[in-house]
Amino acid sequence: MRRLLLVLATAVGAGVAYLLLWPVPIDPVAWQAPAAPGYQGAHAVNHRLAQLRSLDLGGDDGPEHVVARPDGWIYIAVRSGRILRMRADGSGREVAVHTGGRPLGFDFDAAGAMVIADPMYGRHGALLKATGIGPTARLQVLADEVEGDPLRYVDAVVVARNGKIYFTDASRRFGPKAWGGTFEASVLDIIEHQATGRVLEHDPATGQTRVLMSGLCFPNGLALSADESHLFVNETGEYRIWKLAVLARQLDARALTLDAAPQAQVLLDNLPGYPDNLMRGLDGRLWVGFAKPRSEFMDESADQPWLRRLTLRLPRAWWPVPAAYGHVMAFDETGRVRADLQDPSGAYPETTAITETADRLYVQSLHAKTLGWLDKAAAGL
């Protein structure tokens, strides 16, 4: 009996030592999480996103970013490193560009060239330009560092009419290339909460890249205002959306006194989930998708860094990643919610944004096996 007790005590001691001392990749910091609002008011539970129709991706998956072009082509970035294109009915599917990495955000410049944020291209990711379609497409690196610091998680990108390119570097700590993929790196960054993300501008005319704003916890989606004087920026780890002047220079979100910072303001705060991508829609709408609902553990452990460190010593299945819950919403430039569509079943995983056309809503996703879409009339628009 004494020997058994000794064995048990040793095993318990080893387990406690592992949970408390085993090295983990994150160095979490304390922060103040607002009380979760839940699904009420403008975000009351509904099923308007259920019963999606789908378009086949030909064996690819993860339609993370979708752009509808005036010529009728739908472009879709998928996990294999390809950007596909197809007609609205799914016909004519072909590979438009293959980066060999994992394209996330992309946009088109005035000449029709594709500007791509790919955090898994090359050594650690880059902002790319692709000219041509299919096998003749050529890739050019526009930027892979800023002020001598590598871009580790290029994520969202938009091109202004004047040719300037705005994009996010979501984390200076965890790049997908080094940390197991886009989703895995994002989880590490948000759990750690060091707020190392930044919004940048690249000027193709000069080749220069500059920082508009830093100190953001995983800045993700990006969209321009109608007059292109401001950017809307999702700060995923803080459940909020910023409105940021394109003329901003070297702002630090952690040091801002918000009522005294005319170049940056929080437009929507304390959202019910993790805002992911942002897309301009029609009739003044801006669409945001929520990759996941809020995590009760993450909110309650916000001021307990040791507890978040401990979670990464548990089996990955026990990490504080919330269950799938379909949720997208539209708002206008004043921050007024214009539409809210949900599917509590989470049948279509990680609804990261909406691409709106005259008659359809295409639903973006990090891991879905098909491209989901919904008739606008059925969605109440």
Image: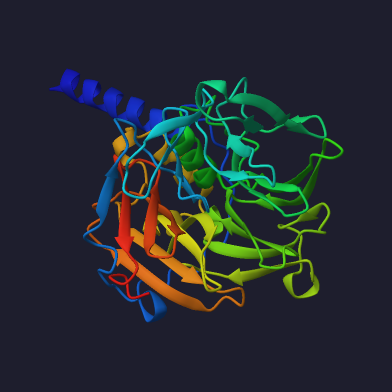
Q: How is the image coloured?
A: rainbow
Camera-side residue of 153 and 68: 68
Q: Nearer the viewer, residue 127 or 159?
A: 159
Percent position of residue 264, x then y: 74, 66
Q: Quadrant of residue 332?
A: bottom right
Residue 367 quadrant = top left
Could you tell me which quadrant the N terminus lies in? top left
Q: Can residue 144 be seen in this view?
A: no
Location of residue 228 with respect to 381 vertically, above or below: above
Identify the residue shown where x is 42% and y is 74%: 339
**In front here: 85 or 59?**
85
Query: At x 38% / y 60%, what residue is drawn?
Result: 361
Query: Which residue is farthest left?
Result: 1
Measuring from the top left, give residue 240's x and y in whole percent. 56, 63
Residue 180 percent across, percent down from the top left: 46, 27
Which residue of the protein is positioned furthest toward the front in this rendering?
Answer: 71
Which image quadrant is residue 353 in? bottom left
* Residue 269 as seen in the image, left or right of residue 36: right
